[in-house]
Amino acid sequence: MKIPPPRLHIIFASNASYAVILRRGPTKHVATFGWDLTNNKIELGQWFYGRIYEHRSSLSHDGKYFLYAAMNCKWDSETGGIWAAVSKTPYIKAIELYSDVPEMGGGGLFVSNNEYYLNEIFFEPTKFLKKSSEFFCLSKPDQHCMYGTKGVYIERLLQRGWKFEKRIEHEKYHTTLVLSKIIFDGMTIYKNIINKYPAKKTEWEEHTLIAGDNTVYFSDHWECADVIGNRIYFTELGLLKCIEVTSDPGNLEEKIIHDFSGYQFEAIEAPY
């Protein structure tokens, strides 16, 4: 039986050449990786048995800390089965831990190097199981600060220079969010974030590269993508890739940066 490739998602820091990559697969196994974009060095962080929600997670702007949403379905445990935590990248060992969040909650959005908002319906300070002096949670008691399942992701994209274009309502439970980002004058990438329920494929992204008024590239199989300078970084089929965009739209060559297929679970302790 052929093993399906792992699913990947890149979480970029806003003001640093650093990212955390989440690798999902096999079922209920997630690994974190640090990626230094200055030299393309990939560093394995830790494995987690459960789910880390990529669209509810973010990095501090300097890339040093990871705010994430996690679930292990242990509803009677101290964390309540779903929680928000802050760790030192690329690891997931919590140095700040907020427990018992709602089903679509957990994680949150960093707005600076050390300030963040939780993804929570109503913030309750008593739900912190661990608190660090390194961070400031800007959420206020009884303040609604719920970003939802995709809201943190959209805010992350806006922090990184994407422009929200429109929301398209196709039919009930079928929507498309359209964002754009200018690569350079005359070259723009468009991102469609599609949600459709019920369906065999419930959520995916489409990316279109437009030169002037012409479509020069389209993909509906990139899992995620972002632009730094004139390079598009994206993931597909367990591979981290990039395309260098030039003024010649007919010369778009994909290059593999790293293959995440060969990894297996191993117990790793965070060095802190």
Image (spheres, rainbow, N blue to C red):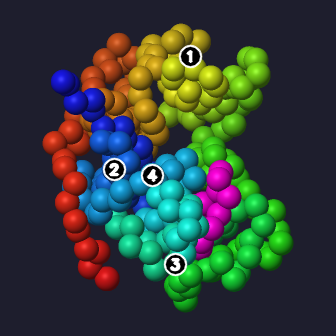
C-alpha separation, residue under disc 3 versus residue under disc 1: 47 Å
* Circles 2 and 3 in contact, beta carbons < 8 Å: no
* Circles 2 and 1 in contact, beta carbons < 8 Å: no
Residue 265 seen in render: yes
Q: Secondary structure at mark 2?
A: strand
Quadrant in which the N terminus appears: top left
| Side of 247 relative to 144 (left or right) | left
Give the mark toward the camera: 2 or 1: 2
| Side of 12 relative to 238 (left or right) | right
Quadrant in which the C terminus appears: bottom left
Q: Is residue 206 above or below residue 161?
A: above
Residue occupied by mark 3: 96
Residue occupied by mark 1: 212
N-terminal of the pair, mark 2 or mark 1, is 2
Q: Secondary structure at mark 4?
A: strand
Q: Main secondary structure of the magenta part?
A: loop
| Numbered circle sitting on residue 51 | 4
